[in-house]
C-alpha cells in the first residue's frame, strides 16, 4: 500500500516536471510564415547585381525554375517575366531571384578528381504578393559536384526553388 | 600531246587553288561551307519551346527567323523578337551521353582517364520575347568556330545584341588564365 503511495507521488512529481519543462503555449511562439495561397506565379528574370554571371547561367537558372515550378502543378498559371497577361491574374505572387555568389567549376576537374571543380550558385530567393509584401525570403544554393556539366547546377537550383514553393504552399 | 598538256595545266590549277584555299584565314563558320547560315549538329540545351532539352538538330537563320529543325519538328523564332545574342566557349566530353556516364564507373580510373579527352564547343545564348511579352532564354551548343557566324547570321536577320560581334571576338581572343 505504502509502495503504491510512493509510486503515485513519484509519478505526480514526474508529470509536474514535464509540465514545467514543456514549451510555452502557442501564442508565445513566433508566428509561422504565411503559406502561399496563390493560384498564379510570375517568375522574374534572374538578377546578378553583385557578381558577374555568364549569360548562359542566367538564362538556364530562369528556364529551369520555370520548368520545375510548372512540374509541381501547384500553380494554375506560371507567367514569365514581362508577360502582360499576368496583370489580370487576381492572386498573383512574384518570384525574385538575385545571385550573390557564383563559383564556376570545371567538369573535367570534377570527373578526374571527384573532390575538386564543383560549380556553385548562391541565390537569394524572394516571393512577394501583389502589394509587394514578402511571403518567402530564403537563400538557395544550386550546385553540381560530380556528374554533369556546369549548367546542371542551374537544374539543381530550379528543383530546390520548386521544392521551397511546394513546402510553403497550402 | 595537246590533250596531255591541257590535263597537266588543269591538274596544276586544281592543286594551286586547293593549296591557296588551305592557306586562307579561317572564316568564322567553317562547318557552314555549303550554307553559311545553317549549322548542323547543333544542340538545343535548354529553353526553346516545342523542342525537348538536349536535342541535337540543325540551327539556321533564314527568312527573318531563327529556325531549329530536328527531323520533322521545326521551331521558328522571329529574329525581330530576339533581344540578345551572346556567344561563349566551352568543352564537353568526347564520349558523352549515357555511355560517357557509364564509363565513369569503369575500373582502374578508366572513366577519369576518358574524361581528359574533351571536344571544344561554342555556345550561343539568345533571349527572346513571345507574343504576350514573356521573356524566354535559349542556349545552343555548336561546333567550334560556328557561334560567331551564327550570331552574325542572326544579326543580319534582324536580331539585336548588347555586345557587337567584333567586340565579342576580341574579348574571346584574349588568353584566359584558368582552364574551364
Image: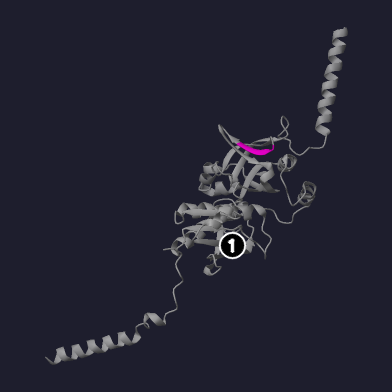
Q: Relative to A167, is B91 above or below?
A: above
Determine the residue positioned at 51% across, 54% down: A78
Q: In the image, B61: left or right of A93?
A: right
Frontmost residue, B149 versus B41:
B149
Q: Give the magenta-colored segment's residue range.
A: B64-68
Q: Quadrant of residue B27?
A: top right
Residue A108 picture location, percent across and down: 62, 51
Residue located farthest toward the left when viewing the structure as drawn:
A1
Helix, strand or loop: magenta stretch: strand
Determine the residue positioned at 85% across, 10% down: B4
Residue B58 picture location, percent across and down: 63, 35
Frontmost residue, A28 versus A139:
A28
Q: Quadrant of the N terminus of chain B?
A: top right
Q: Chain of mark 1?
A: A
Q: Is residue A104 magenta?
A: no
Number of numbered callouts drawn: 1
| Mark 1 nearby-residue class (10 Å; few <14, some 14–19, many ≥20) | many
Q: Relative to B166, is B63 above or below?
A: above
Residue B107 picture location, percent across and down: 51, 47
Residue A19 picture location, percent across and down: 31, 85
Frontmost residue, A158 versus B142:
A158
Q: What residue is pinned by disc 1?
A: A97
Q: Quadrant of residue A51?
A: bottom right
Is any part of residue B3 visible from this angle? yes
Dot 1 falls on a residue whose secondary structure is: strand
Q: How is the image coloured?
A: one colour
Frontmost residue, B4 versus A167:
A167
Is any part of residue B118 visible from this angle? no
Q: Relative to B102, is B5 above or below?
A: above
Q: In the image, B14: left or right of B179?
A: right
Amino acid at each position: 500500500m505504502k509502495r503504491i503511495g510512493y509510486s503515485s507521488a513519484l509519478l505526480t512529481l514526474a508529470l509536474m516536471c514535464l509540465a514545467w519543462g514543456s514549451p510555452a503555449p502557442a501564442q508565445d511562439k513566433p508566428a509561422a510564415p504565411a503559406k502561399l495561397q496563390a493560384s498564379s506565379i510570375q517568375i522574374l528574370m534572374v538578377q546578378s547585381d553583385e557578381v558577374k554571371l555568364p549569360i548562359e547561367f542566367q538564362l538556364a537558372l530562369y528556364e529551369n525554375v520555370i520548368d520545375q515550378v510548372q512540374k509541381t502543378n501547384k500553380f494554375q498559371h506560371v507567367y514569365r517575366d514581362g508577360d502582360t497577361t499576368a496583370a489580370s491574374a487576381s492572386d498573383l505572387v512574384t518570384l525574385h531571384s538575385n545571385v550573390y555568389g557564383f563559383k564556376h567549376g570545371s567538369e573535367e576537374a570534377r570527373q578526374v578528381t571527384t573532390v575538386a571543380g564543383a560549380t556553385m550558385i548562391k541565390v537569394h530567393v524572394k516571393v512577394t504578393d501583389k502589394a509587394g509584401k514578402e511571403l518567402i525570403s530564403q537563400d538557395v544554393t544550386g550546385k553540381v559536384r560530380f556528374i554533369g556539366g556546369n549548367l546542371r547546377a542551374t537544374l539543381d537550383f530550379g528543383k530546390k526553388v520548386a521544392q521551397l514553393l511546394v513546402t510553403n504552399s497550402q | 600531246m595537246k590533250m596531255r598538256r591541257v590535263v597537266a595545266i588543269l591538274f596544276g590549277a586544281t592543286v594551286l587553288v586547293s593549296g591557296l584555299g588551305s592557306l586562307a584565314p579561317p572564316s568564322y563558320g567553317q562547318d557552314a561551307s555549303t550554307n553559311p547560315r545553317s549549322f548542323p549538329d547543333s544542340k538545343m540545351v535548354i529553353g526553346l519551346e516545342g523542342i525537348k532539352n538536349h536535342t541535337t538538330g540543325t540551327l539556321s537563320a533564314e527568312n527573318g527567323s531563327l529556325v531549329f529543325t530536328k527531323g520533322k519538328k521545326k521551331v521558328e523564332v522571329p529574329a525581330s523578337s530576339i533581344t540578345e545574342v551572346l556567344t561563349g566557349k566551352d568543352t564537353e566530353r568526347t564520349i558523352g551521353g549515357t555511355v560517357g556516364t557509364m564509363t565513369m564507373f569503369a575500373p582502374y580510373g578508366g572513366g577519369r582517364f576518358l574524361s581528359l579527352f574533351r571536344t571544344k564547343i561554342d555556345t550561343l545564348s539568345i533571349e527572346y520575347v513571345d507574343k504576350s511579352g514573356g521573356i524566354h532564354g535559349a542556349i545552343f551548343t555548336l561546333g567550334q568556330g560556328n557561334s560567331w557566324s551564327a550570331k552574325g547570321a542572326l544579326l543580319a536577320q534582324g536580331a539585336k545584341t548588347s555586345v557587337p560581334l567584333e567586340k565579342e571576338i576580341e574579348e574571346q581572343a584574349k588568353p584566359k588564365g584558368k582552364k574551364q
